[in-house]
Image: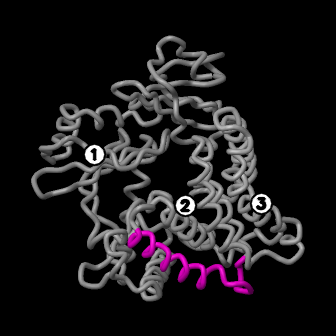
Amino acid sequence: MLRDALGDDLAGPLRVLSREPYGSGALTGFEEGSEPKRYWYVDTSGKRVDAETGFVLGDPEHPEARIWLHPADPRLPALAPASFPDAAATLMGRLGVSIDRVPELLVYRPGKRAMFRMRAGERDTYLKIVRPAASSSIVALQESLRGGGVPVPPITGWSELGIVLTETAAGAPITARLDALDPERLLDSIEALRAAMAAVDTGRDARASLALRHGWYTERIAAALGRAVAELAVARGEDAAGADVAALTEPLAVVTAMVASVDASDLVVDDAVRRTVHGDLHVGQLFVDEGDASAISGVIDIDTAGLGDPADDEAAFIGHLVASIVLAKGDEGRAAGFGRLLEAACGRWLAPGRPGVLRVAHRTAVHVLAHALAPTERGDLVTAAAQLAIGARILQPVLGEDERALI
């Protein structure tokens, strides 16, 4: 679709960067191998936007797709001015902050949010870009959590244009202290953080569980694997491609069996179980005390928080660790640190027979599929297979004998 729309305007090959289910379709990002690189996004959700920033395929009222060039995200109008140095300096000046370096884009989820690090001397501030309608509710959410004793960074400015400015979280990122932390003590501290969040009435629901999209992820990864196999067979011959494919398909069968084996009734969450959760809990969101690497001192990115199933936070934490171990390849110490934390988290939250373990296992399987989807779609079967292999290993003890026999 993108090639048909752009034709000769494309100056290089395309590589899939991301793909997320959205509306009745998906929102997919591509890197164009041009110089300088360009990043295109295709939105097939069918959802309307307030103003188009690219071009539309089909009926403008009910578009088949919309295409834009980063940073012209139609749902994040503040993204473009925050992305260019001069415009960003003006924007930050209006918020009372001077910057002396180029904005650093840390996170970008198309159509949803972006996060920039803004620097002036030794001071870092963080500029979150969200949909305009969401900014005031995020500020209210963050202030309610902070008032309840949850260590979120203070907000120093915001705008209804979809801008929230915060200070740096207290402490150091967990990812910088992996060698010094004690996994069990850290998990105890995370449990205390979750308890503090659970005691706050945010007046809203958490982000929808990834588990609700399990069918989308199983279908997409199967389709991506089929394309990757066909491309490998052409490029390297069927025999040469066989080992890479086998390494992925075997653990994929275990992970998808975990998704398929859980009865719908086992996934129902009783109202008594629901509580305020983070909604996207993982090591990248957590900070630890400078003097004690096992004590949580800060938590960020809480705009997904609200009333939800605690199993979603546990599964997100485990699934992110699975991906982090593989992505840390080449840094054995870092991978080992993630690995120690993963084993402790699985022993605590994925122990067979633990109440609610099937919900955690099902959601973990969906997270593992979600993390493995991107490398599969770009033909990196080695990375996808490594992630799926770890996922299969930690999930297999939870599978019943009947499901194991079917793999």
Q: First in sequence: mark 2 or mark 1?
A: 1
Horizontal relation, residue 245 to residue 20: left or right: right
Q: Position of residue 292 (x, y in %)?
A: 29, 85
Q: First in sequence: mark 1 or mark 3?
A: 1
Q: Amino acid at mark 2?
A: Arg
Q: Residues within 10 Å of mark 3 (few under 14, many from 20)?
A: some
Tell me which residue sits at (26%, 73%) in the image: 171
The residue that mark 2 highlights is: 204
Q: Position of residue 340 (x, y in %)?
A: 48, 80
In front: mark 3 or mark 2? 3
Q: Position of residue 227 (x, y in %)?
A: 70, 37
Q: How many marks do you count on the picture?
A: 3
387 part of magenta stretch: no
Q: Which residues are magenta?
A: 332-357
**Spatial CA span between label 3 and label 2:** 37 Å
In front: mark 2 or mark 1? 1
Q: Amino acid at mark 3?
A: Ala
